[in-house]
Image (cartoon, rainbow, N blue to C red):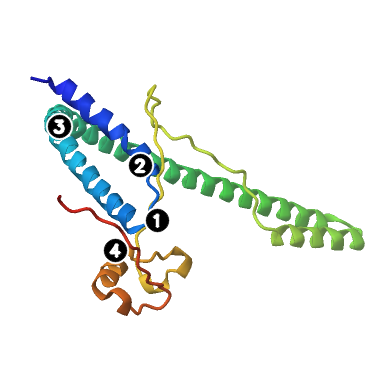
Amino acid sequence: MASVIEMQQHVVERALTWPQRAGALTITTPDTYVDAGEMLKGIKALRNEIDATFDPIIKAAHAAHVEANAQKKRAELPLAEAEAILKRGLIAFDAEQERIRRAEEQRLQELARQEAETQRLADAAALEREASASVDLTEGYHLRREAEALLEQPIVAPVVVVEKATPKVAGISFSTTWRFRVVDPTKVPREYLAVDTLKVGGVVRAMKGETNIPGIEVYAEQNARAGSR
């Protein structure tokens, strides 16, 4: 009795002869037309043998694959759960540190702005006093204009930068992923819309040549199919 491997090799060797056999037949007469049809049925019969030879092996391999994946998933599931818990904690801590950093940065920036404003007022007051003390009217006038111009200028405070207090852990980093959600489909530009090919295909298969969908061209493809001998 032939072994499974020998049976596999036998059907493969037989299948390899078919392209040459098909290419050698030129369909130009009713007889050759019939010959081609018989060859199609022969191909289908050999395909059934191939199914019978390889499908049990594929089924067994697939079952083993499914079981191995299930075992792997059972092993990984608690790790994924623990990983998710830790990642949520890290992200929450980092977000809180960022909130604290921004709040402190805003506080220090406001202090810097107040100091800059206080200094500007002091400088303008000094110019006013100098103008009042000046015996030269022209000089006093220019000093007062300079004080007024100083007060009209926007307050320029030094930029304050506060570093985030999140510690650095080797091998751990954060990334930002931008996502989206559709809030009003009617406002989405046409270039971001896609044709529902599944829905169109269902209508075409049901209506065939009677399909009438604007922008859609319906056509038929002829296929030859071999039945049982």
Give the mark toward the camera: 3 or 4: 3
4 or 2: tag closer to the N-terminus:
2
Q: Secondary structure at mark 2?
A: helix
Q: Are marks 3 and 4 in contact (CB under 8 Å)?
A: no
The amino acid type of the residue labelled 2 equals Ala
Which tag, 1 or 3, sits closer to the chain's start? 1
- Residue identified by numbered label 4: 198
For marks 3 and 4 on the same chain, the one whose residue lies earlier in the sequence: 3
| Mark nearer the N terminus (1 vs 2) | 1
Q: Is 117 positioned to the left or the right of 61 in the image?
A: right
Please state if 107 lies on the left or on the right of 208 as rendered.
right
Tag 3–tag 2 contact (CB < 8 Å): no
Q: Are marks 1 and 4 in contact (CB under 8 Å)?
A: no
**Quadrant housing residue 11:** top left
User: Residue visible at 44% across and 63% down?
Assistant: 192
Q: Which amino acid type is shown beneath numbered disc 1?
A: Thr
Mark 4: amino acid: Leu
Task: Provide the residue designation for mark 3.
Answer: 53
Residue type at the position of mark 3: Thr
Q: CA distance from mark 4 to mark 2?
A: 43 Å
Give the residue at mark 2.
Answer: 95
For disc 1, the marked residue is 28
How far is mark 1 from mark 2, CA to CA?
77 Å
